[in-house]
Amino acid sequence: MASSDQTAKIIDGKAIAQTIRSEIAEEVRDLSEKHGKVPGLAVVIVGARKDSQTYVTMKRKACAEVGIKSFDVDLPEDVSEADLITKVHLLNSDPDVHGILVQLPLPKHINEENVLSAISIDKDVDGFHPLNIGKLAMKGREPLFLPCTPKGCLELLVRSGIKIKGQRAVVVGRSNIVGLPVSLLLLKADATVTTVHSHTRDPEAIIREADIVIAAAGQACMIKGDWIKPGAAVIDVGTNAVSDPSRKSGYRLVGDVDYAEACKVAGFVTPVPGGVGPMTVAMLLRNTLDGAKRVIGQ
């Protein structure tokens, strides 16, 4: 826990996500009553990564909570790329499935691009189809779906009353899943965006200038308190499993930011867990609902 001289306002991702989920549940009920149909989400997981399993379980539970039908597809670590793509094509042609999510990262022997490109753009609730990302990167174009975690990061900023326009934002990490798309979203929201990555010289100096920090590097507690500008908004996307023999699971989740230190300096900070994670799931439900609304009742 942070010490008593804490100054940062804790952004409660769990509470904000719950509000969004209630809004979604209401809309799902409306669809069901008016058209006799509910949104359907297929969640595909390959292998047994701890972090991936945590998120898939959360996603499936969340679907049940808001009335979205969940289609579970669990495949072994050694599944062939061809078999995985065949599965995706089957889901593409299933009219009860309005969203398809393939949990990333995939095992090394599978080409991620081939799999993501196989998902129908109308069902790409993860927002990773090259056409959706391409539109996100272009001015004046709107993708059908925005990637869930980046969308959740911006929603946290907006719902916490944090100004984005004209602010200096630093994104730590450049992954296709978070770093790159969140940079594009911040740019669309008129922030001045810098990306820090493994080849960046003097990352501390760059991060120290940021009004908004989005940490998505996958390095446990990499960002220290003295790297943060006083009053900055810190969104910690990192979910790193660190060994903890006192827990039943044998591990606990920590972020990319040293939370206790950040609390003493930042203006706003998200905890891990309970920050970005629940928002990712809420945005996935929102995207699935939006996908269903484009089809149901047309």
Image: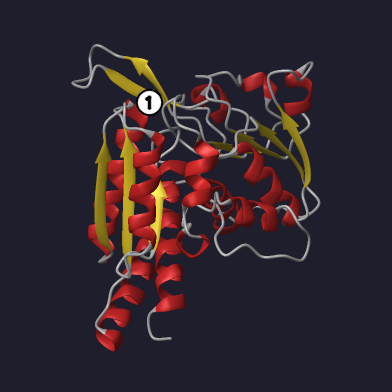
Pointer 1: residues within 10 angstroms few (<14), some, or many (20+)?
Answer: some
Q: Position of residue 122 (x, y in %)?
A: 49, 65
Nearer to me, 50 or 260: 50
| Quadrant into which the N terminus falls | top left
Q: Where is residue 100 in the image (x, y as percent from the top left)?
A: 39, 55
Q: In which quarter of the image is residue 197?
A: top right
| Residue at 47% from the left image edge and 43% from the top image edge | 115
| Residue at 25% from the left image edge and 66% from the top image edge | 67
Residue 290 against residue 63 in the figure, above or below: below
Nearer to me, 236 or 227: 236
Residue 118 against residue 252 in the figure, above or below: below
Is 11 on the left or on the right of 61, as rendered?
A: right
Q: Position of residue 84 (x, y in %)?
A: 36, 41
| Quadrant into which the C terminus falls | bottom left
Q: In which quarter of the image is residue 171?
A: top right
Q: What residue type is labelled 1?
A: Leu
The residue identified by callout 1 is 253
| Residue at 55% from the left image edge and 55% from the top image edge | 155
